[in-house]
Image (spheres, rainbow, N blue to C red):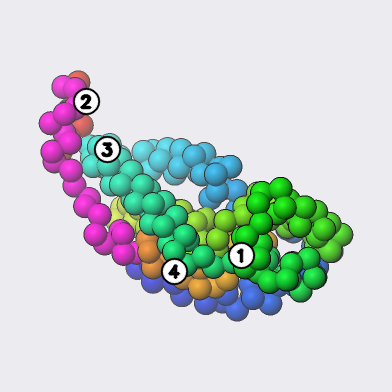
């Protein structure tokens, strides 16, 4: 249900996001807010996001306390596999970031692919030439993320959180919490289009990847309980 909802939500997000003018200089305030939002699913804030979601789940869903090891194992496996597959797909597809097209249009680069032939110092110099041509808030994000585009790692994380935590909440009828998490996931996806880091296909691929992983990753790990210290086993069902 949440998977379908997010996929459907990506349609209007993509329609609006593809109309964003990445050369706009007058949207810095909005861009700054969206950058803060996107950081909640990036290396800057994903751990804090996980802590908040786990804390809320522990508080709102007491049933999970008796299954905490199974849930922790499932989440850990999902996170590890998602990051490995996301990174591998990026290296195989080598899809340039949309901002490299902006740099090409501004005559900073001869082609989007050329950006990835430059070393780190040359990339930084090319970025400097974009000062005054694009929003400073957007440019700051570009400078931090110089890898490939497909699929969206931030959307991978957001979709994973939605299916895992949102799924738990829906099972216990916490629909408002799940709805808010869906809105956050969609906002993360939109923010990636807004700052010029991704195309719609990157977002859809990210959600499909997590949907497939969520189907195949086990939810129960009975063998893991045997290795727990005895004082922790009382919570097992």
Residue 195: x and y, percent? Answer: 67, 61
Label pair 2/3, CB-CB below 8 angstroms = no
Mark 2 highlights which residue?
A: 232
Nearest to N terminus: mark 4 or mark 1: 1
Region in magenta? 211-230
Residue 96, quarter of picture: bottom right
Name the element at disc 4: helix
Nearest to N terminus: mark 2 or mark 3: 3
Mark 3 highlights which residue?
A: 68
**Image quarter (top left, top right, bottom left or bottom right) of the N terminus:** bottom left
Residue 178, quarter of picture: bottom left
Q: Residue at x 49, y 56 (%)?
A: 153
Q: Give the foreground label among 3 and 4.
A: 4
Q: CA distance from mark 1 to mark 3?
A: 39 Å
Determine which of the numbered discs, if any, sits on residue 205 in the image.
4
Q: Is residue 37 above or below residue 202?
A: above
Q: CA distance from mark 2 to mark 3?
A: 10 Å
Label pair 1/3, CB-CB below 8 angstroms = no
Name the element at disc 2: helix
Mark 1 highlights which residue?
A: 97
**Crowd class of label 1 (few under 14; some 14 to 19; many from 20; radius 10 Å):** many
- Left or right, 212 with respect to 195, comes to left
Q: CA distance from mark 4 to mark 1?
A: 15 Å
**Crowd class of label 2 (few under 14; some 14 to 19; many from 20; radius 10 Å):** few
Residue 62: x and y, percent? Answer: 30, 39
Q: Is residue 50 above or below residue 1?
A: above
Q: Residue at x 80, y 70 (%)?
A: 106
């Amino acid at each position: 249900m949440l998977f379908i909802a997010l996929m459907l939500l990506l349609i209007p997000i993509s329609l609006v996001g593809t109309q964003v003018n990445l050369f706009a200089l007058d949207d810095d305030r909005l861009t700054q807010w969206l950058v803060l939002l996107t950081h909640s699913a990036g290396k800057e804030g994903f751990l804090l996001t996980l802590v908040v979601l786990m804390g809320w789940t522990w508080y709102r869903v007491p049933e999970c306390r008796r299954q905490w090891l199974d849930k922790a194992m499932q989440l850990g496996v999902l996170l590890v596999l998602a990051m490995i597959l996301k990174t591998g797909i990026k290296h195989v597809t080598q899809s340039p970031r949309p901002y490299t097209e902006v740099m090409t249009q501004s005559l900073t680069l001869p082609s989007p692919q050329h950006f990835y032939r430059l070393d780190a110092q040359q990339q930084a110099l090319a970025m400097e030439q974009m000062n005054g041509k694009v929003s400073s808030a957007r440019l700051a994000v570009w400078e931090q993320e110089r890898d490939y585009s497909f699929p969206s790692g931030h959307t991978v994380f957001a979709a994973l959180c939605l299916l895992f935590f949102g799924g738990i909440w829906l099972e216990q009828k916490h629909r408002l919490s799940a709805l808010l998490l869906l809105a956050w996931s969609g906002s993360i996806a939109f923010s990636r289009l807004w700052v010029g880091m991704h195309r719609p296909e990157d977002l859809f691929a990210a959600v499909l990847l997590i949907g497939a992983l969520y189907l195949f990753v086990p939810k129960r790990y009975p063998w893991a309980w045997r290795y727990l210290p005895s004082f922790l086993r009382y919570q097992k069902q």
